[in-house]
Image (cartoon, grey):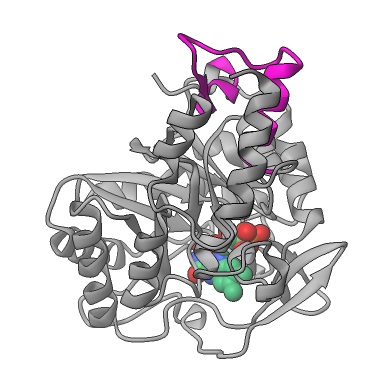
Amino acid sequence: MNNSGLLDSLARDFERFKRELPRDFAAHVRSTYRIDLTARYLGETLPHPVGKGSGQLSLNASQLETDADAGLAFAVLKTVIAQDAAGAQSMAAWAIHETKMKVERRGGGWTVTWKGRGWDRSFEDYLTLVRVGRDLTRAGRLLTVPSVKYHLPRLNEPFRFDEYAFTTSALANAWGESPLLLEKDFSPTLAGDRLAEEKQQILRWLREVPACIREHSAVRLAMKLMNARFDARFQREMTEAASAADTLVVFNRLFDAERGVAYGGPELSDRNLRVLGSPTPGGGPGLSGTGNIHTGRLIVEYALRGCSSVQLHTFFQLPLEEYPATHGSRTQRALHALIFDPREGLIAVMLEREADGSLERRAGDLHFLDLLPDAHRPR
Ligand SMILES: Cc1cc2nc3c(=O)[nH]c(=O)nc-3n(C[C@H](O)[C@H](O)[C@H](O)COP(=O)(O)O)c2cc1C
């Protein structure tokens, strides 16, 4: 089929999938469009690049079941606050409870305003959720990855190794298989905290945290970097300092000091894409993009800067009437728009790049991972 024939198919698929998105839509995309959406996150191969970022949408088993049914590629569990064997949490201020989330417009896009922070139930409850995720992962239904916020010291203080030891070992035991896949969260509210006023302090965390975690278990580690309240150059310095991680999640939400809340929207993706856009040396950690991703075109923008997968939160929370699909879970409706929108969807933008000569077929297929710069392409 030529390009215009494919665009006709796309218009038809977009319409008919409004009622129901096939769970294995990646196989459909492969056979209909000869487009291979294979992606990578934390060393794992995914059928397509779209996952769910850690937060309020991965707090319980039923959310994970819905995501598995929708054909989401992966889900990062809500961030738990590390504790030692006695249950003490140095970052306890992050384990606060808040129920109300508000989806609001900001800067021409969407943001979610919410004042809560990490997991606010017991650590035992978190381990139960990790086991649910483990079972879904082993069944090949949904890759799930736990997320932790561990103790972060001031420059002249040592790390509290007992928190690292207890939390990491407990998660590894619950997971059962080695290595444990884990995200370490440096959250946007941390960026607004006095702890993060010092550049040297932040760089020390990024350099030393991977060894603190791996000391206790075999861990394949993603570090989710905050947007520090410094300039883009420092943001790149942070990325380099974190080079011992296996993957970097780039970059968590911005912090509005006036309102005391984290936020997203176009300002977030603009900044993230600008920081990622300057040449980075290859051979470093893999990248997973996050921040205001609400179209396939934005997935491509992150991929062009080295991201082999993406993690969304806000786009899975919009009012139902904002999605073009008329049926299905929010996860399905979001995937439908991200992949099949005839102008802004991932298929449309990959075909557009084929037509303008910036993406070529190999043995007849277009490949999502071919969007990445050479130095970032997984081998
Ligand atoms: C309500 C809410 C809660 C979140 N909680 C966490 C969290 O606990 N841990 C974390 O690493 N990221 C958390 N995030 C960040 C998201 O995972 C995501 O990286 C970020 O919002 C940027 O993506 P988005 O613009 O698609 O929302 C949260 C985001 C929102 C909106």
- State ligand 1's quadrant: bottom right
Q: Would you say residue 327 is visible in this rendering?
A: yes
Please name the residue shown 67% across and 18% down the image: 354
The number of callouts visible is: 0
Question: Residue 79, position in %: x, y?
Answer: 43, 68
The single residue placed furthest to the right in the displayed view is: 107
The front one of 341 and 358 is 341
Judge from the rendering whether residue 333 lies leftward or rightward of residue 59; answer left or right: right
Q: Quadrant of the C terminus?
A: top left
- Along the line of sight, which residue is nearer the eye, 122 or 153? 122
Give the quadrant of residue 115.
bottom right
Q: Is residue 367 magenta?
A: yes
Question: Looking at the figure, which quarter contains the N terminus?
Answer: top right
Magenta residues (range): 345-374
Above or below 111: residue 35? above
The answer to whether residue 150 of the structure is visible from this angle is no
Image x and y of residue 345, in percent: 66, 43
Residue positioned 24% across, 54% down in the render? 137
Seen in the picture, residue 213 relative to 245 is either above or below; the reply is: below
Q: Is residue 366 left or right of residue 143?
A: right
Residue 279 pos. (x, y %): 69, 22
Q: Is residue 342 left or right of residue 44?
A: right
Give the residue drawn at x 22%, y 76%. Answer: 128
> Compared with residue 190, is residue 266 higher up or lower down, i.e. above or below?
above
Q: Quadrant of residue 133?
A: bottom left
Q: Nearer the viewer, residue 344 or 83?
A: 344
In this rendering, would 267 be left or right of 163? right
Q: Is residue 362 magenta?
A: yes
Give residue 276's position: percent from left, percent from top. Answer: 68, 35
Q: Residue at x 20, y 76 (%)?
A: 85
